[in-house]
Structure formats: C-alpha cells, structure tokens
Image: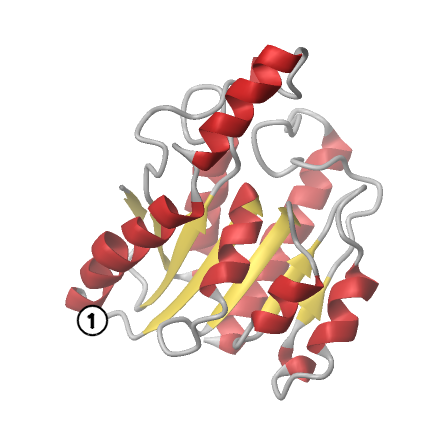
Amino acid sequence: IYDVGTGKKAIIFIYDIFGWNETNKNVFTFADDLAGRGAFTVIMPDFYRNEAWPVTQFPPQSDLQQKAFNTWLKGVASDIIVRKDIYERVLPHLFKSKHEKIGVIGFCWGGKQSFYMGADGERFNAVASIHGAWIDEEKANALQVPCYYGPAKGDTPVETIKKVLDKKKFGKRCEYKAFSNMEHGFCAARGDWTDKETMKQVDIALNGVVKFFEKKM
C-alpha cells in the first residue's frame, strides 16, 4: 500500500490498468499532490500484485494478445479482487486510524471501480472518476454518493451521466468537467506530463477533485 498524507479525511486511489511502477510514475505524483493540496490521507493499494498490464502492449495488437488481455482483466484485474482488497484490507486500516470520511478516486479502469464503490453509501462519502472506462448509465444509477465526473475524449460524455445523476437526491452535489481535447489516460501512464497543455489540464483535474472532496466529505 502506498500511503501519503496525514489528513483526517481519506481518499482511496485506484489507478489504470498500467498500475503503479516505473512506467506509471504519474499516479504517485497525483497522489502526493492530492494529499498535499487537500490535506487528505491518500491510500493507493497494489491491486495487481506487481502484475500490471504493460503499457507497450496496449491496445492489443493480435488475437493472442487480446485473449491474454481479456484473461488478465478477468483474473488479476477482476472487480472481485478490488472489492476484496478495499473491504478486507483498506477500510479496516482506515477505520482503525479513525478516518470517518472516506472517498474514492479512479483513473480509467479505476474510474469504473470508483463508481462501484460509490454504490455503497454507508462506507463512502464521495467518489471521483477521471477519464473513467466502462462507465455507463447503469453504474451511474447505482451511485448513492456525490460524484465528480471528468471524461476525456472518447469516454462516456458528461450529458449521459448527468442525466441519470440529476434525478438523484444528491444530484445537485455532483460536479462535472469534460476534458474533451485530452486523450483518454492523460492523468495516468499515457499522459505526457512534459507537455504544457497536458499539465495544465492535469492541474485543472487535480484542483477540481481537491475542491470536490473538500466540500463533499
């Protein structure tokens, strides 16, 4: 577990399919900045057990590689493993540390996971998804807590999710920011953080979720 910050409010950080490693250092920087700017405790577990999908093999270039990726998704990166880690390891740790307000933020694959966690209004107070993958109306309808939704180019558009969440009791507490000119994954492994425009948008996303979690938790 990567654990940074000392704030009383905690945020569980769920990254993309490329994990946390030398290739994907961006997630560490984002976690550090999230903890620093928002005075949060940020927890980032090693969900993949050092078996993240290689960024050089995405998207899959052959039928064999696609089959291997699908197998990885259903095994190493299965939804059950994430839920098990969070409910059996992370939450007990946070409760023991007296963190009563807990949020979840996810990138790409992690965005989907944040929506799943957001369906549990008893344990979580707010969730955020930045360029989330596999986000749809069904997952949005299951949410029980306020959500910050920030899709990139090609992701499920704000309008689709907002239409569902506007009907919720907490609908007016949700926030949205479309990063329409940014490629999917710009905050994580596939983001070129040496590019000024990319960094500008990363900073907008970071400040957006910091303010969101400060207000909603």
- State which quarter of the image contains the N terminus: top left
Q: Quadrant of residue 168?
A: bottom right
Q: Residues within 10 Å of mark 1 (few under 14, many from 20)?
A: few
Q: Is residue 25 visible?
A: no
Expressed as whole percent of the image width and height from the top left, the position of residue 190 reads 63, 27
- The answer to whether residue 111 is seen in the rendering is yes
Residue 36, x across and y down, in percent: 42, 53
What amino acid is at disc 1? Lys
Left or right of 106? Residue 40 is left
Above or below, 71 against 3 in this view is above
Position of residue 1 relative to residue 5, above or below, is: above
Q: Position of residue 58 (x, y in %)?
A: 62, 20
Q: In the image, what residue occupies the spot 65% across and 65% down?
A: 138
Q: In this orientation, which residue lies closer to the viewer: 82 or 111?
A: 82
Residue 47 in the image, given as x and y percentages of width and height: 35, 39
Quickly name the residue at label 1. 98
